[in-house]
Amino acid sequence: MRLEPLIKYLKIRKRNIIDETGYRPAAVVIPLVMNDSISILLTKRSLKLTHHKGEISFPGGRADLSDSTKLDTALRELYEEIGIPQSEVFIIGLVDDYLSITNFHITTFVAQIPYFCPYSYNKEEIDEVYIIPLRYFLKEPKTEIYKRGDLVRKNFIYDIDRIRIFGVTAQIIKDLTHIMKESGFIEENKNFIF
């Protein structure tokens, strides 16, 4: 996997920064792995959790007082949830900020992590780990209008085999694949994607 086009592009790209005042700070990692092809690691959140239970998401979570930065939050959560130590994570760059419907302000990092299966994930927080080839996300997702009280949002949906990815996770994936196309990452790595 050639990361240089994406690394260079993220350094010069103007990212969407959202003021986090009034929101709960959180951070996630979009983990890219290389096995037979370039894939994205996603998790199924435990049904025991308070927020977004049973949903497909990236490793990540709420910032702790012990976290000095959002990157600290993202790396701590990556380790707590799927057991990947910081020493084995290569941060590619920072992408946009997002807001969840549950009032979280999400800072989003893209990283390369090692491929090994099964990951030793935290069964209190995670029910399953999925490694999904990037090519499945290069088509346009389905859309629907989501309504919750006064909130009305366009919701993106990826249905892949038996899993449904929606909400902010699907939005992040959609935006990331657009960034990957713009940066030349897709073209540079087509032999590892298609």
Image (cartoon, helix red, strand yellow):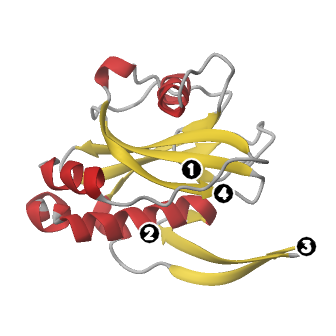
Could you tell me how far apart the alpha carbons at marks 4 and 2 are, in whole angstroms?
Answer: 15 Å
Q: Which residue is mark 2?
A: 174
- Marks 3/4 in contact by CB < 8 Å: the verdict is no
Could you tell me how far apart the alpha carbons at marks 1 and 4 are, in whole angstroms?
Answer: 14 Å
- Marks 3/1 in contact by CB < 8 Å: the verdict is no
* Quarter holding residue 91: top left
Instruction: Provide residue 170's location: percent of width, then percent of height.
Output: 53, 65
- Marks 1/2 in contact by CB < 8 Å: the verdict is no
Could you tell me how far apart the alpha carbons at marks 3 and 2 are, in whole angstroms?
Answer: 25 Å
Q: Which residue is mark 1?
A: 57
Instruction: Provide residue 11's location: percent of width, then percent of height.
Output: 27, 50
Q: Is residue 76 left or right of residue 94?
A: right
Q: Residues within 10 Å of mark 2 (few under 14, many from 20)?
A: some
Disc on res. 99: 4
Could you tell me how far apart the alpha carbons at marks 3 and 1 are, in whole angstroms?
Answer: 23 Å
Q: Residue placed farthest to the right in the image?
A: 149
- Asked if residue 98 is positioned above or below residue 123 in the image, the reply reads below
Q: Which amino acid lies under the numbered mark 2 shown in the image of this protein? A: Lys
* Quarter holding residue 114: top left
Question: 158 or 15: which is nearer to us?
Answer: 15
- Residue drawn 38% across and 21% down? 86
- Asked if residue 117 is positioned above or below residue 22 in the image, the reply reads above
Instruction: Provide residue 32's location: percent of width, then percent of height.
Output: 32, 46
Q: Considering only order in the chain, which callout, 2 or 4, is on the residue closer to the N terminus?
A: 4
- Residue drawn 32% across and 72% down? 138
Mark 3 or 1, closer to the camera: 3
